[in-house]
Amino acid sequence: MSGVLVVLEQRAGNWNRMSFEALAAGQQLAAALGISCSAAVVGSGIAALGTELASKRLDKVFLVEHELLGEYTSDGYVTTLEQLVKQAAPNYVIFPHTYQVRDFAPALATRFRRVLISDVVAIHAEGDGTPVFVRQLLQGKLNADYKQTAEAPAFISIQAGTFRADTVVEGAAQIETINPAIEASQIRNKPGERFRESASTVDLTVAPVIVSVGRGIGEADNIPMIEELAAALGAELAASRPICDNGWLPMERQVGSSGQTVAPKLYLAVGISGAIQHLVGMKGSKAVIAINKDENAPIFEVADFGVVGDLFEIVPALTKAVLAAKS
Amino acid sequence: MKIIVAIKQVPERDAQIQIAANGKWIDEDDLTYAINEPDAYALEEALQFKEKNGGEVIVLCAGPERVTSTLRDALAKGADRAIHIEADDLAQRDTLGVAELLAVAVKAESPDLILTGLQSDDLGLGQTGVVLAELLGIPHATIIMQVEKTDTGLRVKRELEDGWFQHVDMPLPALLTIQSGGNKLRYATLMGIKKAKSKETNTIAAADSSEAAALKLARVYLPEKQKKTVMLTGTPEQIAAQLVEKLKFEVRVI
């Protein structure tokens, strides 16, 4: 086929929300290179998803079904997709950069003696040149251009929010059902039911104003200073992962890829450097204000207003000024 | 149970980063290095597992001479011995090449369990553990918060997206990539630092890479700004006054 193959993610018949962003990436890469784009969905009892995909502009839809694929296992997926990639022979295999893809795609690429180009935030491709895949390094402090030097296939996973799902081009495609050869004995891990620790009582997604705190706060005893600012602004309090890991704020207040995704009117980031895992959870905010001591912190790349300085001086002054303005 | 913890030495989080003159990596002179944070959690998980179930914890690190300081820190925290794969050319090897180096050292030890962090703070590819498991032909699970011994192997708690979790039962030997934050990290005690001096570090030379790398890092550069950021300056009071102005008239949340 020598085109692009996008492997979408679903669970129990529901799409992962990043699947169509990856599909947009695949269609755009194929268009830039003048090659075809196909898509695959893997699972059990997913005919409806295949039909939905067949309404997109694609060369082919591979409906990859097997009863052993009803529940995700890395062994099941690697075995299946190895067969699919060998059969379809694409030049580029594109995935959404989900937790599930992180679990199996590196092993899949290894079967072809390739290295997954993971967590891609931009693709530069034109004509017959080798595409450049942009990744972030050092928690977003630097960008890096990666090129595959080995022959096809190349394996690429796309970070959330890099491509827009609403840019997927409609069309029509033929469905090809594939029943991979898998034995139950090949699946070594036995996954249990999914569960949540506790019912989340904080819904940050509806908060119009969020004050969020990161590592820069230093210690738990300093959190009340941020709480006072949040209270003054009538804002919900949120945090980056390390703060919740340390138990300084409950996990349900975490924003980022492992926490909530928010898009408030104002996101005020205090002492947050802005690693990609955090940025994907808040970069849809209408306005972002960042206060950080490091002028090179990646949070400033997405900030409308930035303050480089000591948060322990600026936050109390800001709280005071907000209260004065409101009174 | 024999546990190997694969760790990486990376630039410290607060390190000032300069792009190297050739534009292909960062300037490594005058950089300070530390253990990759997720790997520190993998080490902690291994040490706690050993305290509960007995066994041996071996730390494994590939890199130039400087990485021995990170191995020594791990020994001081309680690892029993260390293996240093001496390699000055890690930047020329891709993930597969590095995982192959690790696989050779791991095979020689035949461990029951291999732990590593879920990703590195520098390259952030998040793959070395999974690739290593594939090369060794053993099962793996990623983004793991807890590890328990069972009669038949392990039960691990795997983090999924959006606050969901899942337990996974798996046989041994196995490889796990550990999520940050599952445990509280220990500090090395004075006694630990003293004991570390008598612990063994086995240095092995890295084999030449068997194949050309599949991937090339062509260029590193500062990210372009996604937004035009207005930087506010002045005394804290002046900055606060400007911010309130913006909050009132531009963001309109006051």
Image (cartoon, coloured by chain):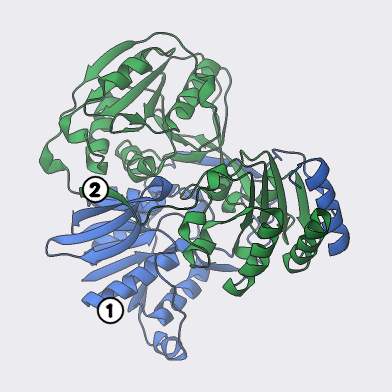
**Residue A66 placement: quadrant:** top left
Q: Secondary structure at mark 2?
A: strand
Task: Give the residue pinned by disc 1.
Answer: B51
Q: Is residue A219 above or below residue B134?
A: below
Other residues around mark 1 within 10 Å, as few (<14) / some (14–19) / many (≥20): few
The chain ID associated with circle 2 is A
Task: Give the residue pinned by disc 2.
Answer: A193
Image quadrant where one finds the N terminus of chain A: top left
Residue B108 in the image, given as x and y percentages of width and height = 24, 64
Q: Residue B88 versus residue B80: which sits nearer the camera? A: B80
Q: Secondary structure at mark 1?
A: helix
Chain B colour in the picture: blue
Mark 1–mark 2 distance (CA, rounded to whole Å)? 29 Å
Q: Amino acid at mark 2?
A: Glu
Q: Residue A132 versus residue B188: which sits nearer the camera? A: B188
Image quadrant where one finds the C terminus of chain A: bottom right
Residue B29 appears anywhere in the view = no
Q: Nearer the viewer, mark 1 or mark 2?
A: 2
Q: Is residue A256 left or right of residue A326?
A: left
Other residues around mark 2 within 10 Å, as few (<14) / some (14–19) / many (≥20): few
Chain A colour in the picture: green
Point 32% across, 70% down: residue: B46
Per the rendering, the mark at residue A111 is: none
